[in-house]
Image: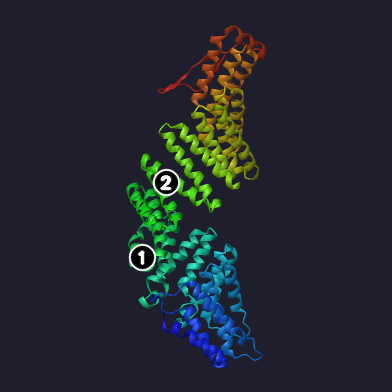
Amino acid sequence: MGPVRMLLPSLRATARLAPRWGGPLLGAALLHCAAPAWVLLGPPPIARRSAWAAEAVALYRPLAARTRPEQRHLDALSRALAVHANTLVWSGRYAEAGQAADAALRVPGALRPQAVTAGAVHARAQALVHGGRAEKALAPARDCVALYRGTTPLRRRDRALGGLPSALNTQASVFAALGRTEESVAVYLECAALLRTQSIRQSSHFLRLRPQVLAELVGGLRELGRYEEALALGPEVRDVVFGVITRLLPELVRPLHVRILTDWAFCHSATGAPAAARTHAEEAVAEARALADQPQWLAVALNCLAVVLAELAAYDEQMSTLTELTDLYARLGDDRSEVYEPLLADALDDLARCHRRTGDYLKAVADTERAVAACRSTGRHEAQLARSLSNLSIRQDEAADAESAVASAREAVTLTRRLAESDRDTHRPLLARRLRVLARALGGTGDHTGAVACFEEAEALLRASPGADAGDLAVTVSDLAVALGRVVLDRLADGHPEEAVVGLRTLLALTRRSDATDVHARCVTVFAQAHAERPDDIVRAWERVVGEAYPTFVYRRTDSRGLGANPAAR
């Protein structure tokens, strides 16, 4: 305990006995304790510091409210409110912090040093951004940076209120919260450069800040795709974040270790170094296991390791990692379902993919059903639910549960239709894919007519979407040709040659809007099969419906790879 803190009981007694001079003396001592200038001695818990600042505010408020208050009391009240605002921010009491910061700036008649004004504006910016109001935090964040740039070197008593590095860090965090990552990284780079130039005495006031800035900088560079720059920070980060400070502030820097290592792992993966990515991911998991009271960091690290193992085709290890991850997400979801249930659904879907790869389709279905249940539990993630239902349909189909596959696919299509009403550009291509899944499920039940309707709608959607993937359209048209062929042969087998002719004409029309070789080959094959199986029936039906002779097809060889794409009918 510091000497000033030891004197507080005596000073409180003095303030009661001689309030005129004892009160200001107690107030100065309380502010000294609430905002210690020498941080290497180990500051007291933030709750105690906040209580001291509140006591100082309560002490100075009546002195400043007198009819003719002394100037020093007005100035002291403004400073006490600014200190209290900062301690409230550190306590996570953001609404109260904003109120205290505003009050510090509104003390009538106070002559605040510019550092106190900057500290109060900084506290307001932090309260707004951490309170989820980043748009409103942008102006005060810029203002406090400008104020600190315009101040002379801070006096010792003012350093605890902040400084230019902490103001830059806040401004960068505001940009990040607004999704303006490039601007955020630019400010973090300036802040990191400023911290590098400081002396040991100056940097002692930003002992906690420099590791945080470097961690945010690595994450921002990764998000921008500037992977080499993020990796190039390695030596500095290892020295600053993984060095002696780990022993001094383990509760602060160990989570930063996990963040940085996972970011590096993804950077190595993106630059084609999967072995290095695995090393960093495994190191992140080891660091996260040491944070037994913060299991969310283990979830972050396990997710990163699972992604890296998939890229390395280490599927057995990926499966065990995902199993641990899904169990962890399920436990974390008991307290924060809105955050962890969607993550659980994604991890279960990945785990189902692992089971598919091993041929265990029943386990794949079970995991995907759990993913669907996780999506339903929050009721706020319709897009993810639609994707999970579509995947469930595919896996039910593989597990020979055709009826369930149809039901899941229908629900996925219904949800995606609703989403497409509000965001056509995003969801129309997805709707086409979900319709294709439904069509295949219907085909598995023998409903080829229903499958054709789904494929035709999917084709129409893709042709109407300028940004649609050409591969999606090619697959849809190819599947449509197969489904039409099955409809033709089914109608012939059922004794309905006129309906078979309708299918043949639809298939022929498909070849005129597609230049795919497989589609034309399918058309030729189906015409030939129909003629071979029921020659009299199909010929007479064609002549009745079309009024022409049944066509014969001639393959035209176009290159060394095979037959020509365009059938000639005459």
Tell me, for residue 246, which label it has, or none.
1
Who's the residue at 39% across and 56% down the image?
A: 288
Q: Which residue lies furthest to the top in this view?
A: 536
Q: x, y percentage for residue 335?
A: 53, 54
Q: Is residue 155 visible?
A: no
Helix, strand or loop at mark 1: helix
Residue 489 location, quadrant:
top right
Count of marks overlaid on the render = 2
Q: Which of marks 2 and 1 is nearer the N terminus?
A: 1
Q: State the SS at label 2.
A: helix
In the picture, which quadrant includes the C terminus? top right
Vertical position of residue 531 compared to residue 421: above or below: above
Residue 273 location (% of width, % of height): 34, 48
Q: Between residues 216 and 406, which one lies in front from this camera angle?
A: 406
User: What colour scheme has been applied to the protein in the rendered image?
Assistant: rainbow
Residue 324: mark: 2
Q: Do the residues labelled 2 and 1 touch (CB within 8 Å)?
A: no
User: Which of label 2 and label 1 is nearer to you?
Assistant: 2
- Left or right: 275 in relation to 553: left
Q: Can residue 167 be seen in this view?
A: yes
Q: Residues within 10 Å of mark 1 (few under 14, many from 20)?
A: some
Q: Residue 437 carries which label?
A: none
Amino acid type, mark 1: Thr
Give the CA separation, mark 2 to mark 1: 27 Å
Front residue of 424/79: it is 79
> Is 152 in front, or is 387?
387
The N terminus - image quarter: bottom left
The residue sitting at 53% across, 51% down in the picture is 334
The percent position of residue 60, horizontal first and vertical second, equals 58, 84
Query: Is 381 situated above or below 249?
Result: above
Q: What residue type is labelled 2?
A: Glu
Tell me what residue is drawn at x 50 percent, y 64 percent: 173
